[in-house]
């Protein structure tokens, strides 16, 4: 059992009298999930008697007077790609999570993959495709828009016949497509708060862990901690922390990883605004060490206030 006492002992007196503004919604494809995450965070904070205002972000950003700390729950476009962070940094408004530079790097899967390779982090071979360009990697492979989350637009291509439709689908979201060599393995995700690695979560679903399997109740099963040997557990946790640090992240993230039967790892991506519904992956990991959603929100808020934001 790792030592998580320092998380339980954060100075929550820093939150006394704080006016939280929870941002949710956003203009991207993950809007529906974001609305649920934001509502869950707002309810959790109110359960601890904090002053909370919820703001549904659609166009622009209007914050209420007296905003002390923005709790950002806008997933995907605008909320996770550095745009919102850049806007808040310029206004001098404190907010949860990492700053604009780290969020931009993590959100763009192409930039993140290049950083992983440079840092020696295990990740599947990949190519970047433009419209009409043919890959040098042969099927099976995975095509995905580089700047989307929640498995939106992701396609597993098993034959060349499937290629045109998959490319057309991906190009609806971006002008380039990320191609990764298909990697078969167990689905794992590891949450990190500062440099503290929470227990890995193992996800078991029928077929690819896509949008519906993520958000429709009963489509997937979760095991916390993941059912891994001690050696595999350490390897997965080390890879997750290395990915977090390679992207320059300082506060919190959730790292998605595949583990093959032979013990090889494939770091897929790093999420800087993880879902925060009670059933979401980071809250599941936190709950396994005695941190409920309301305390998790407090910990993230305290560390965000203490850390400050640097671009």
Image (cartoon, helix red, strand yellow):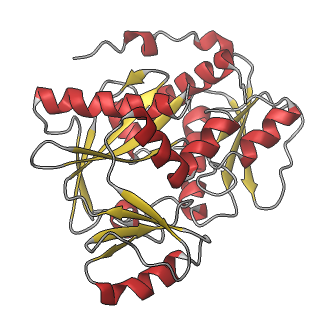
Residue 42 in sight: no
Residue 216 placed where, x, y %?
36, 66
Residue 29 in sight: yes
Question: Residue at the location (37% across, 60% down)?
Answer: 214
Question: Residue at the location (69% across, 45% down)?
Answer: 82
Up/down of 22 relative to 61, above or below: above
Up/down of 107 relative to 300, above or below: below
Quadrant in the rendering for residue 278: top left
Front residue of 271 and 299: 271
Front residue of 202 and 238: 238
Q: Going by the image, does 172 lie left or right of 183?
A: right
Q: In which quarter of the image is the C terminus?
A: top right
Residue 114 placed where, x, y %?
48, 46
Q: In which quarter of the image is the N terminus?
A: top left
Q: Going by the image, does 198 lie left or right of 13?
A: left
Residue 198 placed where, x, y %?
34, 28
């Amino acid at each position: 059992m790792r030592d998580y006492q320092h998380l339980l002992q954060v100075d929550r007196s820093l939150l006394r009298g704080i006016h939280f503004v929870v941002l949710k919604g956003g203009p991207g494809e993950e809007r529906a999930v974001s609305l649920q995450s934001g509502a869950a965070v707002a309810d959790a904070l109110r359960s601890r008697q904090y002053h909370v205002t919820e703001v549904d972000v659609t166009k622009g950003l209007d914050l209420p007077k007296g905003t002390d700390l923005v709790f950002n729950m806008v997933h995907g476009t605008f909320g996770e790609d550095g745009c919102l962070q850049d806007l808040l940094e310029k206004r001098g408004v404190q907010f949860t999570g990492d700053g604009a530079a780290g969020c931009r790097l993590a959100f763009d899967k192409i930039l993140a993959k290049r950083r992983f390779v440079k840092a020696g982090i295990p990740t599947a071979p990949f190519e970047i495709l433009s419209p009409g360009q043919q890959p040098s990697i042969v099927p099976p492979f995975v095509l995905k828009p580089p700047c989307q989350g929640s498995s939106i637009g992701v396609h597993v291509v098993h034959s060349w016949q499937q290629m045109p439709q998959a490319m057309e689908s991906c190009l609806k979201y971006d002008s380039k497509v990320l191609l990764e060599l298909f990697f078969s393995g167990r689905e794992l995700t590891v949450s990190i708060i500062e440099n503290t690695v929470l227990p890995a979560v193992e996800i078991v679903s029928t077929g690819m862990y896509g949008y519906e399997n993520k958000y429709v109740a009963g489509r997937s099963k979760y095991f916390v901690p993941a059912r891994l040997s001690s050696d595999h557990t350490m390897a997965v946790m080390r890879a997750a922390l290395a990915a977090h640090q390679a992207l320059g992240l300082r506060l919190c993230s959730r790292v998605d990883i595949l583990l093959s039967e032979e013990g090889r790892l494939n770091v897929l991506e790093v999420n800087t605004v993880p879902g925060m519904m009670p059933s979401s992956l980071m809250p599941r990991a936190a709950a396994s060490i005695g941190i409920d959603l309301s305390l998790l929100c407090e910990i993230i808020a305290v560390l965000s206030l203490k850390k400050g934001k640097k671009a």
